[in-house]
Amino acid sequence: MTISELQVKDIIAVEDGKKLGYITDLEIDVDRGYVLALVISLKGKVFGLFGKEDELVIPWHNIVTIGRDVILVKTERPQLTHSVDE
């Protein structure tokens, strides 16, 4: 599976079925060639034009399944970051 194929999938929280957004980046362990986490731009912002664009980091072990159209994730204790203008 390619990164571009992952980026078009909806990210859904298994706890409540809430759509979280789309993948904007991946954290990768370059030494081992593993994906460590998905970085998701939270919906509600338009490319950061209307305020700060928040990102949610989902560790790879919190991915429940990757389907044809969606990625189901556990969101317990997510790491929330601000990507611009902190």
Image (cartoon, grey):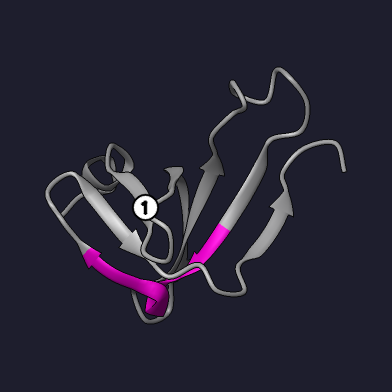
Please state the extent of the stretch shown in magenta in the rendering. Answer: 57-65
**Quadrant including the N terminus:** bottom left
- Helix, strand or loop at disc 1? strand
Secondary structure, magenta segment, majority class: strand
Snapshot quadrant of residue 67: bottom left
Residue 53 percent across, percent down from the top left = 68, 35
Task: Looking at this view, name the residue that lies furthest to the front.
Answer: 16
Residue at the image point whose x is 56% and y is 61% from the top: 57
Residue at the image point whose x is 12% and y is 49% from the top: 68
Residue at the image point whose x is 54% and y is 41% from the top: 41
Q: Nearer the viewer, residue 22 or 17?
A: 17
The residue type indicated by label 1 comes to: Ile
Snapshot quadrant of residue 62: bottom left
Residue at the image point whose x is 18% and y is 44% from the top: 69
Instruction: Left or right? Give the position of 46 relative to 29.
Output: right
Q: Which residue is mark 1?
A: 12
**Quadrant including the C terminus:** top right
Up/down of 44 relative to 75, above or below: above
Residue 43 percent across, percent down from the top left = 53, 34
Residue 30 percent across, percent down from the top left = 43, 71
Residue 60 percent across, percent down from the top left = 40, 73
Snapshot quadrant of residue 17: bottom left
